[in-house]
Image (cartoon, coloured by chain):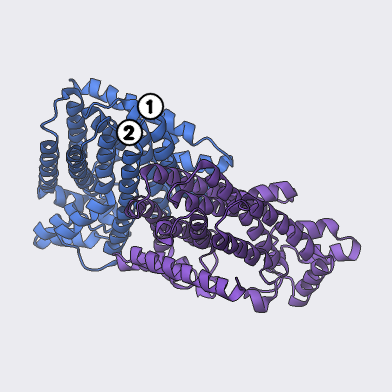
Chain colours: A purple, B blue
Amino acid sequence: MRASSMKNELDSCAFAVNEFLLSQLDGKPKALYQASSHYIRSGGKRLRPFMVIKSCELLGGAIKRALPAAGAVELVHNFTLVHDDIMDNDEMRHGVATVHHQYGLPLAILGGDILFSKAFEILSYNGRKVGIGDKEITEMVGRLANSCTVICEGQTIDIDFASNTKFPSESQYIDMIGKKTAALFEVSCAMGALSSPNPGIKDVDNLASFGRNIGVAFQLVDDLIGAIGDPKVTGKAAGNDIREGKKTLPILLALRKAKGDERDKLMKVFGSKAASVPEIKDAVKVVSDMGIDEDVRNAARQHMAKALASIEGYSNADARRSLQFAADFIVGRSL
Amino acid sequence: MRASSMKNELDSCAFAVNEFLLSQLDGKPKALYQASSHYIRSGGKRLRPFMVIKSCELLGGAIKRALPAAGAVELVHNFTLVHDDIMDNDEMRHGVATVHHQYGLPLAILGGDILFSKAFEILSYNGRKVGIGDKEITEMVGRLANSCTVICEGQTIDIDFASNTKFPSESQYIDMIGKKTAALFEVSCAMGALSSPNPGIKDVDNLASFGRNIGVAFQLVDDLIGAIGDPKVTGKAAGNDIREGKKTLPILLALRKAKGDERDKLMKVFGSKAASVPEIKDAVKVVSDMGIDEDVRNAARQHMAKALASIEGYSNADARRSLQFAADFIVGRSL
């Protein structure tokens, strides 16, 4: 299957999920629902719902059965974005004003909260409507709720990293992104499996492992983009995470590898809001020249290989290729 | 049964619920779980869990079966308190610092969020552990999630009331408190019914109706206390809601009833942070002298009567008396 037809498939899943979600977020008071659907209406690839749908298809389930779980994970994802933006006090996200910036703090908190509650409403009510059994719905609710708990823990650890003067170890970093990011990918694929007509526990485990590893790879590449991504591609200032002093893997690796003059150039601007654009560019060049890009992509590829090993025994070649495409897309994203 | 033994029963339910919840909120990072359990550790009557437990007992279920649902509603209740305090920028709640005041905004948002996710984890995992069927768990998840959606809507309407110069009608006010407050009482009793061994839909409806009417009565009395409560009893400044310009039923009724000089005294201080203590006392006296207390208690009693009618056919006299006690306690609370 060619990349362009896979791209079409991603778009067509996104279309189905958007249509479903916007119909669920059409209530009153209008301002509350506008605030809650603000990011959903502003676009997005719907990568997590895609993984729910393709995990379900891998086990013989049609997209219709996967839509409640697909919608629920996207709502949870959006809920974390809305609340994270408040905590970080960010004004913009992907070219649109953040929810609290546009609608004010109360509607941003409530708009986030209602995304959360709608996710669980959809799982139970719409799950039943499409024929998913109560046993599987109960299992999905427990797993999705637990992933939300874990995401809150991961987010707290991330905040601790930022306020602590010490640098985390590589394994502490991997643990944190496992919670903050990979938990939702893991539950996406597990819920996709649970949405299929006759899910076995082994299938759910395999898909969960696939999702978890893809999630770690996703965050590794995301952090690479944050450190040395091209502003023309990413839409963010060059070396954004270096300037903000984020303790992500690419930056940890760079600080460990750099010596003498290179290290000085990096440390001078790390976490310095006052650093000049040429100084940041110099620091980005230091990181790039040390081959950190390749180191991080290799780490991401290792997780991708583990992910793909979890699903290699399944016979539905189309769905398997779609999941492989998602994995390639995630690891291969441009800087 | 005497009031003192009923009080013991309320305390003993609260003890069981506290023990259960604190064991569920003992995780890492510690600061996150401390923030999330801050209000739970600082006391509270656990009225909603009491109603879950007694609704379950009314239908022949033991307290053990009701604990997951009882814990879940208390977590949801606390989640709304934590987030509401951020929105209102309150510094104190019942004599302790608010969560965001003590732990900062990020931990207050995340601490609230994790209460929400734990509620649904407990419903599914612990619900299964105590032997509740997946069908009933799925039903509880849908109802609890829906009540959270409705609470967010009610909270938004309440914020709209405050920022709007127009006064809401009595029915708009009842609709708002139905969403903001009564929805959680309604789902508490419905989930208590669903936690019993063989819940019928009619039983669930009856208990839901009981809870809904009790919830409306609860908020009516709460708003009465906010308007004219005795600071020695309530711990809040006299005429707190009058000074803050809250458009609650007692204040709406007072403004409608007051004429001439009395109306002037009220309007002068309504929503005026600069009003002097004697001026506020005068306004409170105006409201009291007009008999608003009795008007609001009568409205609350009407809802209480509807509530009690919903459960009068049940044969478990102990549980029915406990629910009646809860109703009396709510409507009879001192000013």
What amino acid is found at the position of numbered circle 1 in the picture?
Ala
Q: Residue at x 14, y 34 (%)?
A: B311
Regarding residue B314, the answer to whether it shows in the image is yes
Q: Is residue A177 left or right of residue B295?
A: right
Regarding residue B101, the answer to whether it shows in the image is no
What amino acid is found at the position of numbered circle 2 in the picture?
Lys
Q: Foreground: B268 or B186?
A: B186
The disc numbered 1 marks a residue on which chain?
A: B
- Circle 1 sits in a helix, a strand or a loop, which is it? helix
Mark 2 surroundings within 10 Å by alpha-carbon count, few (fewer than 14), some (14 through 19), many (20 or more): few
Of callouts 1 and 2, the N-terminal one: 1
Name the residue carrying label 2: B45
- Give the residue furthest to the front: A315
Q: CA distance from mark 1 to mark 2?
A: 12 Å
Q: Foreground: A287 or A312?
A: A312
Percent x, y for residue A173? Answer: 69, 51
Q: Is residue A115 left or right of residue A226?
A: left
Name the residue carrying label 1: B16
Q: Is residue B173 left or right of residue B65?
A: left
**Is label 1 or label 2 in front?**
1
Mark 1 surroundings within 10 Å by alpha-carbon count, few (fewer than 14), some (14 through 19), many (20 or more): some
Please state, as top left, top right, bottom left or bottom right, where the C terminus of chain A lies in the image: bottom right
